[in-house]
Image (spheres, helix red, strand yellow):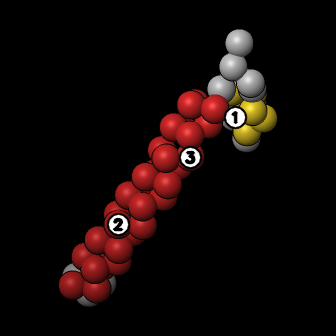
């Protein structure tokens, strides 16, 4: 059996821990892009 690693999602295999880290970074990058786009959109449309 593979050695289990304790992560913020519980105990997982090393491969699952690697995938979780990759997905966390990906989600963080996407959310930054989305906020940047929304901020640019808000700047273009002045509130009345």
Q: Please say if 18 is above or below 25.
A: above
Q: Position of residue 4 (x, y in %)?
A: 75, 26
| Mark 1 and mark 2 residues within 8 Å of each other at the beta carbon | no
Residue at point 21%, 84% (across, down):
44
Q: Position of residue 41 (x, y in %)?
A: 25, 76
- Report helix, strand or loop for mark 2: helix
- Report helix, strand or loop for mark 3: helix
Residue 3 found in image quarter: top right
- Residue under label 3: 21
Residue at point 73%, 39% (across, down):
7
Labels 1 and 2: the sequence-earlier one: 1
Q: Please say if 47 is above or below 8.
A: below
- Residue under label 2: 33
- Report helix, strand or loop for mark 1: loop
Residue 8 found in image quarter: top right
Q: Residues within 10 Å of mark 3 (few under 14, many from 20)?
A: few
Q: Residue furthest top?
A: 1
């Amino acid at each position: 059996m593979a050695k289990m690693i304790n992560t913020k999602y519980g105990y997982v295999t090393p491969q699952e821990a690697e995938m979780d880290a990759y997905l966390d970074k990906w989600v963080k990058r996407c959310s930054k892009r989305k906020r940047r786009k929304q901020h640019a959109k808000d700047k273009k449309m002045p509130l009345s």
